[in-house]
Amino acid sequence: MSHFSQYKDTIQPGDLALAWVSRDNVKPFRIVPGESFNTRYGSFEHNAMIGKPYGSQIAVRTKGSNKFGFIHVLQATPELWTISLPHRTQIVYTPDSSYIIQRLQCTSRSRVIEAGTGSGSFSHAFSRTAGHLFSFEFHEVRYQQAKKEFEDHGLIADGNVTITHRDVCQDGFTIKPTDTTSYYEGSSAHPHVAVTLDADAVFLDLPAPWDAIPHLDEVIMKNAKVILCCFSPCIEQVDKTLEILEKHGWTDVETVEIQGRQYEARRQMVRKLDDALNRLRDVRERKQVGVERRKRMFTKLLNEEDTASEVRPPTEKTQFNPFGKGSRVKEGDTKFQWKEVTKVEAEIKSHTSYLTFASKIGKISRNEEEVLRELQK
Ligand code: SAM
């Protein structure tokens, strides 16, 4: 069973877990009794995690101090894998993959083609949702690394992923018995026979998708609507893709771009005009006091009097100033008035590419006799 598709309540030996160390430090690790997960905040024993619910905070006392270091142990999900995986290529991030999955109308019955596999970020998301994923990668080392990772994560033998070592632009997508693929290694039930892909969703993250598109007709479903998405960073690539899509009978063509934004709910201090006026008065008074003190000092210097003996009057600590510097006030402090606001965070991590969608129905004529028979039933 895939570590990414089953829900588990508690942490068990052999699980692939994710340690949430901080917002931008999430690390995958395997739960092995007797081992430890080491961070600069401390060493966390796996035995202390086993049996605890996923999401638990695990704390250890930092050596030689009274402080504690802690991590949260989380269950593996495609989203967390995307932010923790070892990068071998550019990857597709969740804001894009979630949008693409819904636009491809991907469900547990979908048969999806993906090229190239790259770092396998999107493959994990597809694997959780789709019925079967056929992933293609032409780079030998990346193919081997992705295959091993998919095997470790239970996506191949017990899962729904077939990965094939292939240049799809040159050799297309048909899986033949002579191919290097996880299918023949992982499934003894289907020894060395050609594989029927019958895909109804296609995702191409390739530098030259226009060379792969003409090969798709051989492997997509003929009697259902097939949806395709091409992920390209440059508009010139989009242009070439559109040309080839039109030439090969793809319709409903649309190019979109995801601009990820994170909206944060915050409280903002209510600032009144009176506050501004009080602050200006305060600044003016302080300035005046300073000017007069300096004047006195100069006069004394000129008269050669002892200036060191002048005692500086204690200045009252600046009251909080809602318009500038001052003592820090905690958000929501009940001594002040607040209003709920939305703060837009800077763009979130998504590899900004153009997403070109298109669809195709292979068999556009219908068998009138068959339709009639169905209607008469
Ligand atoms: N979508 C992947 C992810 O989320 O991790 C990243 C894909 S990466 C940007 C593109 C991959 O396509 C590279 O690993 C590259 O080796 C592979 N590739 C490029 N041309 C290819 C081709 N003609 N056939 C198969 N794979 C190809």
Image (cartoon, helix red, strand yellow):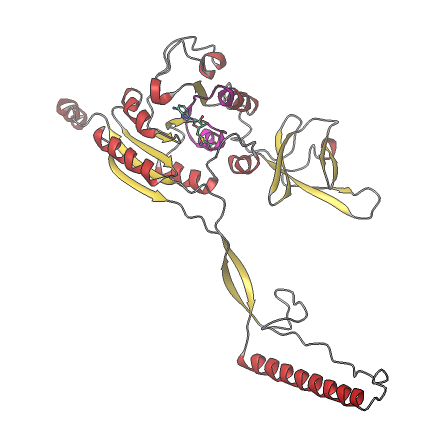
- State yes or no: residue 71 in magenta: no
In this image, 196 relative to 94: left or right? Answer: left
In this image, 321 relative to 299: left or right? Answer: left
Coordinates of residue 237 in the picture (x, y in percent): 33, 35
Magenta residues? 116-143
Question: Which residue is at the front of the view, 149 or 339?
Answer: 149
Question: Which residue is at the front of the view, 286 or 302?
Answer: 302
| Quadrant into which the N terminus falls | top right
Quadrant for ligand 1? top left
In this image, 78 relative to 168: left or right? Answer: right
Q: Is residue 263 above or below residue 47?
A: below
Q: Is residue 313 above or below residue 96?
A: below
Question: Which residue is at the front of the view, 11 or 218?
Answer: 218
Residue 105: tell me if it is visible: no
* Image point (21%, 30%), residue name: 247
* Image point (86%, 86%), residue name: 306
Quarter of the rendering containing residue 236 = top left
How many marks can you see?
0
Q: Is residue 206 above or below residue 186?
A: below
Question: Which residue is at the front of the view, 103 or 290?
Answer: 290
Coordinates of residue 109 in the picture (x, y in percent): 38, 28
Coordinates of residue 32 in the picture (x, y in percent): 69, 26
Residue 124: tell me if it is visible: yes
| Quadrant into which the C terminus falls | top left
Coordinates of residue 313 in the picture (x, y in percent): 79, 84
